[in-house]
């Protein structure tokens, strides 16, 4: 029974943590807990979270990342927005 109580406490702590992130960025309310955990755990690897873009940003299919253009911390910079409806591609300036 002690293990079950610890598991319940862990679940509650995780739910509280995710709720805190959702309050900071309300678009996270549109994604499941599993998707949000994946986004947060791979936040330093933008190419791995691109599959979640349509869930966070409506009418967005993905972003194009340019590995040749990087931030100071070495992350690729998004250069284009690709719409989820139609075939619109918007380059960032």
Image (spheres, grey):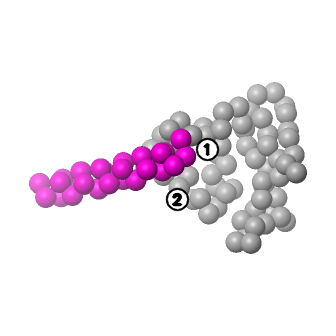
- Residue 72: give x, y in percent of width and height: 74, 72
* Outermost top residue: 86
Observer-nearest of 80 and 24: 24
- Residue 4: give x, y in percent of width and height: 18, 53
Q: Which residues are magenta?
A: 1-26
Q: Is residue 60 above or below residue 67?
A: above
Read off the residue under disc 1.
52
Give the main secondary structure, helix, strand or loop, of the magenta stretch: helix
Q: Residue at x 71, y 31 (%)?
A: 59
Q: Residue at x 36, y 48 (%)?
A: 15
- Residue 33: give x, y in percent of width and height: 45, 44
1 with respect to 93 (left or right):
left
Identify the mark nearer the N-term, 2 or 1: 2
Q: Residues within 10 Å of mark 2 (few under 14, many from 20)?
A: few
Q: Residue at x 77, y 59 (%)?
A: 77
Q: Residues within 10 Å of mark 1 (few under 14, many from 20)?
A: some
SS label for mark 2: helix
Res 75 label: none
**Snapshot quadrant of residue 44:** bottom right
């Amino acid at each position: 029974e002690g293990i079950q109580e610890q598991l319940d406490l862990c679940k509650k702590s995780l739910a509280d943590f995710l709720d805190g992130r959702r309050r900071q960025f309300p678009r996270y309310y549109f994604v499941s807990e599993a998707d949000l955990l994946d986004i947060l755990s791979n936040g330093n690897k933008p190419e791995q979270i691109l599959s979640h873009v349509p869930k966070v940003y409506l009418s967005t299919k993905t972003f194009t990342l340019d590995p040749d253009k990087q931030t100071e911390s070495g992350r690729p910079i998004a250069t284009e927005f690709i719409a989820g409806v139609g075939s619109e591609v918007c380059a960032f300036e």
